[in-house]
Image (spheres, grey):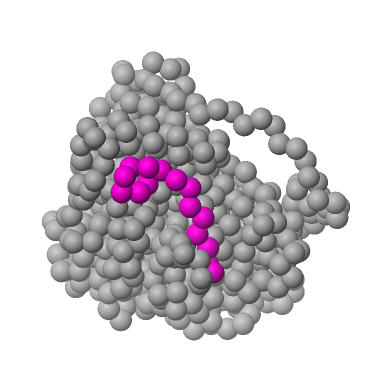
Amino acid sequence: MADATRRGFLSTMTAMGGAAVATAVTQGADARADTLSRSCPPTPGLVSVGPDDPRYQDLILRGYNARFLGSPETVHVVHSADQVVRAVNQAVRAGKRIVVRGGGHCFENFVDDPSAQVVIDLSQLNGVAYDPRHHAFAVEAGATLGQVYRSLSLGWGVTLPAGTCPSVGVGGHVAGGGYGLLSRRHGLVVDHLHGVEAVVVDRSGRARVVVATRERDDPHHDLWWAHTGGGGGNFGIVTRYLMRSPHATRRTDPANLLPAPPAGILACQMSWDWAELTRSTFARLLDNYGRWQQGPMNEPAYAGMDTTLALPHRAGGRIGLTALLDVPGPAAEESMGRFIHAMGQGVGEPLIEVFGTSPYLRLVTSSGDAAGSFYLRSKSKCGYLRAPWTPKQVETVYRYLTEGEEDPGGAVYLNSFGGTVNKVPADATAFPHRSSSMIAFYDVGWYDPAQDEEKLAWVRRLYREVYEDTGGVPALDGRNDGAYINYPDLDLADPAHNTSGTAWHTLYYKDNYARLQRVKARFDPLDLFHHGLSVRPPGGDAAVRKAAAPAGRGRLPRPEPRSYAKPAAPVHGVAHRILDAGS
């Protein structure tokens, strides 16, 4: 999935109970016409909020990870691209560092950082509409996935193969690649990206709106390419995405421009009691799962299957496995039965907690959201897998998940990947991980700031030992395929944690990084848009351009890639941590 809130999604699957009843959503033929013809209400003006405004605390506490908290001088709430231009011009003239917030789900301090002076909040720039000029759907960058799914499905009967956490913002999700439960059948979100509208700043410090498309003769084609996996916060501020599948026919019919949502999702949630698993049966379960991803998963019957193996600490009680098939019916049930049987071989029969068909829209708009509490502190890491873990890696994971009597609050997830995603050449988009079958996700969450060092140390040790033979990171080889920029991890840019000799940008972008640097030089020559893992200007990893700029403007600070072992202090006396909250 494109977001990492698997915990919330899995809890939703469990709450579904027995078999969900499939329902159909019907709509009149004039619904799409009404969407195009209705008049729009007046757009609010640019809203600028400072520390003395009662709205300030709510706006700065929208981040996913309570380890980080900024104290910007101003938060601009924007409602149009023109307002973004105005806010950027003001900040550039004043020499202020700009950051952008969409859904607020970033795992690191890209927005919530002490050096950030101006936050441009896109949450109210959230429309979804058909754009007849481009024959594409215009999705504004502040929309959430839940809003997008509902609008596209109920308005036009189409969808996108994006993530299942409905509160994730479109802005950063799409820019990093975007994957979800339909991606093995339909590819990444960026495989359906026709164009991007963005506010960029030229060498004189002037902001302007640029539209870049997939069309080869578009003079801004490279800016489109950079947003097909190059990550957010690198080249400017995206204000809207234009979505249209590359092979769409009958372009005048909006219902033909994107994939149709499935009639339903056959969902199965199974689990095994940790108390009944031994070291060898644990290894057999992971072997069963890995072999399936390499073999049967590539058969036509499983083209639309998405799976997640959730491995919590033994103290958590049970190991969970969720499987989703996007074609319901007797044939799908038979296919699911084969999957269940294969997973239990040599392990033991799993407990089937959910087996039934759910309406697709309900599934992708109602999942629980672990980011709902802004008190949660967390650290996440990931690694793409071309082949299953080695026995040594399996042993390492087993040891960390079984040592001690207390639950460290951590878990490891193995998510299916590949399928149609891997049919696209690695350089056709900025997203380069086109040969992986799984992605491993390592996660720990807690609430008490006093536990920061303990929890960070736990997940860092685990990750380092899993990748001990490749310098502590998933360095590129026949088994590992780097990391996903939408799961950012500042440790990959820290020589204390990455001893592989492989640069962080190679792990995230592979051979596509040099082209991303050229796009950076053209569309952000002043390096205004940057963070700890942003694309660097050409000339070296540490290069920060002090290019021509308005008089009086100094060089804006670039935060260095670093890890934070201590929490930021509360801003303006707000107690934004709850020490005794439940997990």
* 73 is higher (above) or lower (below) than 456: above
Q: Quadrant of the C terminus?
A: top left
- Out of 321 and 251, give the one closest to the viewer: 251
Q: Picture coordinates of residue 137 (x, y %)?
A: 64, 56
- Out of 95 and 225, give the one closest to the viewer: 95
* Residue 212 inside the magenta-drawn segment: yes
Q: Is residue 122 left or right of residue 130?
A: left
Name the residue located 53 percent from the left edge and 82 percent from the top edge.
Answer: 298
Q: Quadrant of residue 247?
A: bottom right
Decide if residue 63 is in sight here. no
Name the residue located 33 percent from the left edge and 26 percent from the top edge.
Answer: 73
* 433 is higher (above) or lower (below) than 407: below
- Out of 499 and 16, give the one closest to the viewer: 499
Q: Picture coordinates of residue 45 (x, y %)?
A: 55, 27
Name the residue located 14 percent from the left edge and 58 percent from the top edge.
Answer: 495
* 280 is higher (above) or lower (below) than 374: below
Q: Picture coordinates of residue 110 (x, y %)?
A: 32, 44
Q: Which residues are magenta?
A: 201-215
Q: Is residue 263 left or right of residue 411?
A: right
* Residue 237 inside the magenta-drawn segment: no
Q: Is residue 255 left or right of residue 209?
A: right
- Out of 577 and 448, give the one closest to the viewer: 577
Q: Picture coordinates of residue 14 (x, y %)?
A: 58, 52
Name the residue located 48 percent from the left edge and 31 percent from the top edge.
Answer: 77
Decide if residue 251 is in sight here. yes
Q: Total marks drawn?
A: 0
